[in-house]
Amino acid sequence: MSPTNLHFASLLLYSISTALALARLFQRTRTTLDRAFNVTMAAAFVLHTGSIIFYSRQAGHIPLTNLFESLQILAWFLVLFFFTALLVTRIAVLSFFVTPFVLLLSAWSFLLSKQPVAPPQGAATSLFWFHILFSLLGLAGLVIGVAFSWMYEIQEKSLRNKSSGRLSRLMPSLQTCDRWGRLSVSAGFVLYTFGILHAALWSHRSKGTYLDLSAKELGSVLVWVIFAILLQARMTWGPHGRSQAILGAAGVAAIIVTLAGIR
Amino acid sequence: MSGSRFTLVGLSHRTAPVEVRERLAVPAERVPEALSRLRQIPGVIGAVLLSTCNRTEAVCEMADGAGAKEIVLVLASIHGLEPAFLENYLYVFEKEAAVEHLFHVAASLDSLMIGEGQIVNQVKEAYSKAQENSSVSAGLHLLFQHALAASKKVRAQSGIGELAVSVPFAAVELAKKIFDDFSRCQIMIIGSGKMGELATKQLKSLGTSRIFCANRTLERAVTLADRFGGAAIRLEDIPRHLPDTDIVISSTGSPDTILSRETVAEAMRDRKRRPMFLIDIAVPRDISPDTATLPNVYLYDIDDLRDVVDSNRRSRETKLERAEALSAREIAAFLEKVRSLEVIPTIQSLRTAMDELRKVELEKTRRRLGGLTSDQESALDDLTASIVNKILHYPIAHLKTSAPENADLRDAIRKIFGLK
C-alpha cells in the first residue's frame, strides 16, 4: 500500500472520528459512541503512522522538511498527545475540540500530498531536526492546552449564567480544565521555545543571521508571544476564562498562519 | 431454573416507617448468619439479603411448591420480632414480580431519591456477601448479574442519576463543576440552617476535611463544628479565614449582610483569584448580590438553586419515563432468557431420544441391506439426521419462542414424544 493511500484512509477515518466526536455531544447513549470513536480514532492513528513510516522509507529521511511533511507530523503528534491526555484525564469531551483540528491538518497535508523530495540545503544538521521536532511537539501541546481553556470558558459561562445545558454537563470542573490547560500550555511553550532557539541557532549557522524577518519566522515569534502572554496572565491573575479562551483562539489562528508560511 | 422460582420478601421506605425499617435492618456482621438461616428453609435453593437504611429484602430462589411464609418467619426471628408485627409492612413478590422489583431496586427506580447511585453498590455488596457465604444459586447468579448490568444500562442511557433534585444536592452538584479535589477544599459554614448543614454533610462525604463553622454565638459554632469535626469561629473572624476558603455556605437568620463584596474582593486578592463558590441559602440574603460580579466568584442564592432544582425535576420526569421503559425492556429480555433456559432440558432430551431412535433404526436398515460402501453409509447417516432435524425444527422453535405458555407446551411435547 502506498503512503498516499494510507494517508487517504487515515483522513477518511479522522473525518468519521470528527463526526462521532460531534455526535457524542447530542447523543444520550454515549457508551456505544465512545467505543466507536475510540476504535475509529485508533485505526486512523495506526494508518497515519503507517503512512509516515512508508513515506520516510521512500524519502530516505525523517519527514519534517516541508509543509506537507510538517503538517503530517504535527497531526500525528497532536493525536498522540490527545490519546495521552485522554488516558490520563479521562475527559472524553476533549475529542470534540481536538479531532476537528487533527482533521484540518490531515486534510491540508493531503491536499499538498506529493512524492518525497530531498530535504532543503543545510537541513542535515541536528539543529534543524531539533528545531522542527521541538516546534511541532510544542505546537501539539499548545493546541491541547487551548482546548482545555475553551472547556474552561464554556463551564464558567454556564456557571455565571446559572444555566446547566447539555454541553456544560459534559465539561469537566473548572479546576480540572485549569490544571490540565496550564500543564499542556506550559509544556508546549517550553518545547516550542526550544524549537525557536534551535531555529535561530540553525539560521545563524546556515545563513549567518538569527532572524531573517520572513513571514514564517515572524509568525513563529507571534505564536510564542501570544502564548507567553497567556501564560503570564494565568500566573499573575489566576484563571480567567474568557480572555484565556480568546488568547488561545488567537494562538491557534497564528499557528495556522505560521504553518501556511512554511514552504 | 426448571422447577424453581424467585421469591422476594421485604419492606422498604414505601411500606414501612424508619422505626420499623431500623428494627428489621440486618447489620453486615449478622448477614452470614441470616443467609445461613434462609438457606436452611426447606425448598430454598439460594438466598441473597439486601439490607440498607431504606430497605431489607431477602431474594430467594425456591423450589416450586415451597412457600414464602418461612422467609417471613426467619426475617422476624433474626431480631426477635413477632411475624404479626411485620405483616402490615412486608411485601412478597413471586416469579416475574420478584424479578421486576429487583431490577427496579438495582436501577434506583425504587429509591427514596430516585436515580441515586448508592443502591447499585449496595445491591452489588449484598450479592458479593451472599457469594462469599456460598448462598447464591445458579438462578440467583443469573438474576443478579442481569439486574446489575441492566441497572448500569438504564442509568447510563436514561441519565436518571445525573440530576440533583434537592437544594443541598444541587449545591453539591454545582460545587463539582468548580472543584475536582474536595480533599483540598476548605468549607466555611455560616449560621446553622438545616439546608446548609445538609449541603456541608454532602460535601464532607466527598472528602472535605477542613471545615470552619461561624456563628454569632461561639457556643453554637462549637456545637456545629463538633458535629462536622471542624473548627469554630466567630462571625468577626470570617474575613481572616476567607482567603483560604473555597466554598462558603451561609444560612443565618441575620437581617444584615454578613459578607460584603469588599470582604470577598479582598479575600480573592489574597487567594490569587482561585475560584470561590458562595452558596447563600438565607432569606434575607447573607451575601451581597453584587459579589457575583467579581472574577472567579460564583454566587448562588436560594432562588438560583431552586431554579436548578426545578429545571432538574422537569428533566427528571422525562428521564424517569425513559428509565422505566428501558427497565421494562431489560426485564422482558431477562424473563425471556429464563424461559428459554427452562426448556433446555426438554430440548436436550428430545434431541437425545430422537437421535437414539434414529441410530437404532439406521442399524436395523444397515443389517438388512448389508455390504454398503462407506459413501453409502455416510449418505444414509446424513439423510436420517436431516429428516430428524427437520421433524424437530418446529417443535424446538415453538418451545423457544412461545415462552409464556411453554410450560404447557413442554408437557405436551414430553407426552407426545414419550420423554421421561
Image (cartoon, coloured by chain):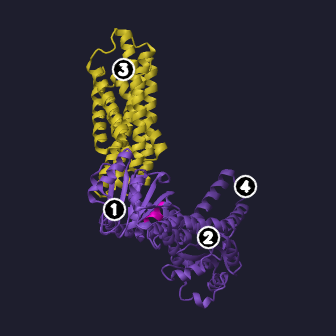
Chain colours: A yellow, B purple
Q: Give the quadrant of the C terminus of chain B.
A: bottom right
Residue B138 position within the rendered picture, expressed as x and y whole percent measured from the top left: 64, 68
Q: Is residue B413 in sight in this rendering? A: no
Segment tinted magenta in the rendering: B199-203
Amino acid on which disc 4 is placed: Gly
Report helix, strand or loop for mark 2: helix
> Per the image, is B201 magenta?
yes
Marks 1 and 3 close (CB-CB < 8 Å): no
**Chain for numbered disc 1:** B
Do discs 2 and 1 share a chain?
A: yes
Amino acid on which disc 3 is placed: Gln
Q: Give the quadrant of the N terminus of chain B.
A: bottom right
Marks 3 and 2 close (CB-CB < 8 Å): no
Tell me which numbered mark, 2 or 1, is placed earlier along the sequence.
Answer: 2
Looking at the rendered image, the disc whose residue lies closer to the viewer, 1 or 4, is 1
Q: Which mark is residue A115?
A: 3
**Chain for numbered disc 4:** B
Query: Callout 3: 10 Å neighbours few (<14), some, many (20+)?
Result: few
Looking at the rendered image, the disc whose residue lies closer to the viewer, 2 or 1, is 1
Query: Callout 1: 10 Å neighbours few (<14), some, many (20+)?
Result: some
Q: Is residue A208 in sight in this rendering? A: yes
Amino acid on which disc 2 is placed: Gly
Query: Residue sitting at 69 percent across and 68 percent down?
Result: B133
Q: Which mark is residue B371?
A: 4
Please name the residue that numbered disc 2 is placed on.
Answer: B139
Do discs 4 and 3 share a chain?
A: no
Looking at the rendered image, the disc whose residue lies closer to the viewer, 4 or 3, is 3
Q: CA distance from mark 4 to mark 3?
A: 73 Å
Quadrant position of residue A137 = top left
Residue B255 position within the rendered picture, expressed as x and y whole percent measured from the top left: 30, 69
Please name the residue that numbered disc 1 is placed on.
Answer: B258
In front: A125, or B271? B271
